[in-house]
Amino acid sequence: MLEQVIRLCKGVNRSTQLADDNEEVPNLQGKTYLAFKLTQQEWLKLELIQDVLQHNTAQEPANAQQTFSATREPTVWCTIPVLKYLQETWESMAGTSKFDSLSTSIQSGLDNLRKWYRKTNDTDVYFICLALDPNYKVAYAKAKWASQDFADGVKRLKDVYLV
């Protein structure tokens, strides 16, 4: 939706200019539609926000949710890599001057991602599904996790399967 609004920015701004004079458009209480017209600087900020949400990489943050909902196959195995990828992408953006004006928002997004990433430790299913996926096995966790976290994951896997 954001991409379409940006693409149609001239029409969106023109609509805000014309809406107040159109009798078919309901009046706003205490405001005019013209008050919602965006400045050039605001449009540029929206483009920057879109860049954060839809980063031009092989696995865009905007598509992370699609990773889970667009398939009819189990996706638990990809939870950890997708969350980690988003975290690494936004950490990289946070360190770039291009995104200075959005640093607080990016940091809030990172805090939320870290919260969900930590929640994957609440159950063994995420690590086990990742470890059992033939594309990842335990190599992903071994490469990306601290050695103690990796050892804990392997121990939980063994506890479940070597009973």
Image (tube, helix red, strand yellow):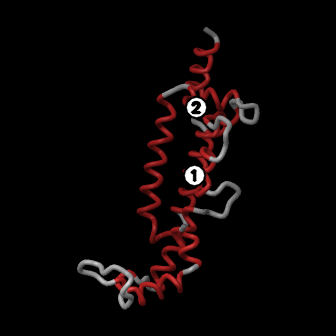
Residue appearing at x 67%, y 43% in the figure: 71
In this rendering, position of residue 1 left or right of residue 67: left
Q: Callout 2 environment at 10 Å: few (<14), some (14 to 19), or many (20+)? A: some
> Above or below — where is 28 with respect to 1?
below
Residue appearing at x 49%, y 82% in the figure: 12
Quadrant position of residue 125: top right
Task: Locate residue 148, reporting x and y percent.
Answer: 55, 29
Secondary element under disc 2, as helix, strand or loop, is helix
Q: Which residue is mark 1?
A: 86
Q: Which residue is mark 2?
A: 126
Quadrant location of the C terminus? top right
Please state the total of marks drawn on the protein image: 2
As drawn, the residue found furthest toward the right would be: 134
User: In the rendered structure, which amino acid carries the disc numbered 2?
Assistant: Tyr
Q: Earlier in the sequence, mark 2 or mark 1?
A: 1
User: In the rendered structure, which amino acid carries the disc numbered 1?
Assistant: Leu
> Above or below — where is 89 with respect to 4?
above
In this rendering, position of residue 136 left or right of residue 54: right
> Above or below — where is 13 with respect to 45?
below
Q: Callout 1 environment at 10 Å: few (<14), some (14 to 19), or many (20+)? A: many
> Above or below — where is 6 with respect to 56?
below
Q: CA distance from mark 2 to mark 1?
A: 17 Å
Secondary element under disc 1, as helix, strand or loop, is helix
